[in-house]
């Protein structure tokens, strides 16, 4: 099973799903398989959340980037095993 790790919040997840349904998703390989296999063969799930902090030194974007890299490695979503581009 191929994986695509990209959602950084619920809005982004909804946008990815909407773009797949409309046939306009930027990841052409994912879109091709979505069209070929149908929506019922895809799962969208939240695997991690990052909470905002009041600490002025907290960098949400850096936290998010680190988390995405970690989950892409964990799920092996890069290259032939997934939809994420290396």
Image (cartoon, rainbow, N blue to C red):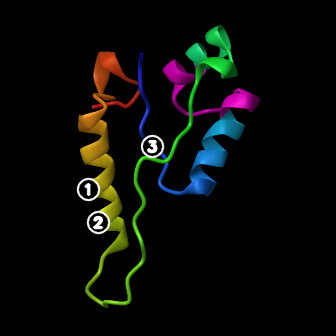
**SS at mark 3?**
loop
User: Which corner quadrant of the image does residue 85 belong to?
Assistant: top left
Relative image position of residue 47 (x, y in whole percent): 42, 47
Relative image position of residue 83 (x, y in whole percent): 41, 25
Q: Which residue, as the protein is rendered here, is positioned at the far top?
A: 36
Do the CB atoms of the residues marked 3 and 1 lie less than 8 Å apart?
no
Q: Is residue 21 magenta?
A: yes
Residue 6: mark: 3
**SS at mark 1?**
helix
Spatial separation of the CA atoms under disc 3 and disc 1: 12 Å
Please tell me which of labels 3 and 1 falls first in the chain. 3
Relative image position of residue 42 (x, y in whole percent): 58, 24
**SS at mark 2?**
helix
Q: Nearer the viewer, residue 6 or 49?
A: 49
Circle 3 crowding by C-alpha within 10 Å: few under 14, some 14–19, many from 20: some
Residue 66: mark: 1
Spatial separation of the CA atoms under disc 1 and disc 2: 6 Å
Do the CB atoms of the residues marked 1 and 2 lie less than 8 Å apart?
yes
Q: Which residues are magenta?
A: 20-31
């Amino acid at each position: 099973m191929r994986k695509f790790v990209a959602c950084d919040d619920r809005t982004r997840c909804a946008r990815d799903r909407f773009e797949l349904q409309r046939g306009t998703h930027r990841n052409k390989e994912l879109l091709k398989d979505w069209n070929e296999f149908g929506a019922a063969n895809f799962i969208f799930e939240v695997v991690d959340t990052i909470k905002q902090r009041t600490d002025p030194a907290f960098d949400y974007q850096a936290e998010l980037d680190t988390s995405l890299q970690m989950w892409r490695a964990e799920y092996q979503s890069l290259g032939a095993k997934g939809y994420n581009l290396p």
